[in-house]
Image (cartoon, grey):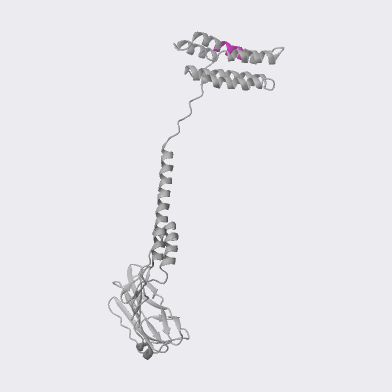
Amino acid sequence: MPTTDRSEGRTRIPLPLGCITLALAGILGVASGLSLSGCGGVQGTAPRRIVEREETAGSVHVRLKSELSPARGTLGDPIAWRLMATLGEGAHAGTAILEPPPATLEVDSSGGKTNPGAGAWSREYMLRGFDLGAIPLPRVQLPITMADRTDTLEFPHDTLFVDSLTQTATGMLRPDRGPITPPLRPLDIAVLAAAALLLLTLIVLLLRAWLRGRRKSQIAEAPAPPEPPEALLARALDDLERDVAVLPRDVLYERLAQALRSYAAASAGVPATDLTTRELDRELARRSHVSPEGREALIAALRRADLAKFARFRDEESEARSIVRQARSVSGKL
């Protein structure tokens, strides 16, 4: 649970860093380091120091508070340390467990009182610091008994700050009015203006780049026109003619027939790859847009390829090249 440190009843809440962008932090950080060094908010004296924490134990909501009065002490001067717990309904507090304090801190619990009440618990100790600077206070745990369970909660950690001045000497000093806020110099104003202008320029450039990229993504590229069936047939026949000498005879004529059927399917819109040569001839004859001359040339080339697959020729390569040339004559006639 979050812990808050309060002085004179004011709560300080840290600013979330996630809301500051990297560019703004870098630019304004440099500017503030140049122009506002030594400046800060005005704070008054803090007669009390309060640290609070809220927890949930089972179904009971508990609020724990540690209070030092005064907030700072001097060597050997007594400081009142009061621990308070606000319990939910049905919860009861037991005896507080105080760990041994450090050697530089004296904790006197003989004069303190424990005030158990309905929904509340408090305990007061008297502290004396015998070292300068920050002295961490000992941990204090409070057992809580509820209807269905028992839990032990720990008070928020706190620190006692000890000064070297005696109480008499401290009273002779003027009250601390906080750091002085000097006015901005012309150089400071110029640095801030340059940082603001640079930040504005960066934002404009990023916005323009984003709009340009979005505009390009919205412009769809025109799809390439489909390749004509004649070009596909010519490329397939070129490959066959180049591999005539190395391809087996059945593979050569099978690929030749497949190229002719693919051309017929693309040109006439018939399922030529699923039909036999005779079925393809009848299907093309029913199509009024198919040229009879082209249909006859296609069927003749297919039948010659089918017969050459199983025939024996004296010059098989020459015959294969002749059939490929006949297949070329079909292009553009269908």
Residues in magenta? 298-305
- View extreme (bottom): residue: 168
Is 102 above or below relative to 236? below
Kindly identify the residue that appears in the image at 55 percent across and 21 percent down: 231
**Quadrant of residue 288 within the rendered picture:** top left
Q: Quadrant of residue 99?
A: bottom left
Instruction: Give the overall secondary structure of the magenta segment.
Output: helix
Q: Quadrant of residue 29?
A: bottom left
252 or 325, nearer to the observer: 325
Closest to the observer, 66 or 332? 332
Q: Quadrant of the N terminus?
A: bottom left
Check the image and name the residue furthest to the right: 314
> How many labels were placed on the picture?
0
Q: Is residue 150 visible?
A: yes
Q: Please state if 45 lies on the left or on the right of 260 as rendered.
A: left
Residue 104 pos. (x, y %): 46, 86
Name the residue at 42% across, 49% down.
205
Foreground residue among 328 and 292: 328
Within the magenta stretch, is there residue 304? yes
Residue 100: x %, y % from top left: 45, 83
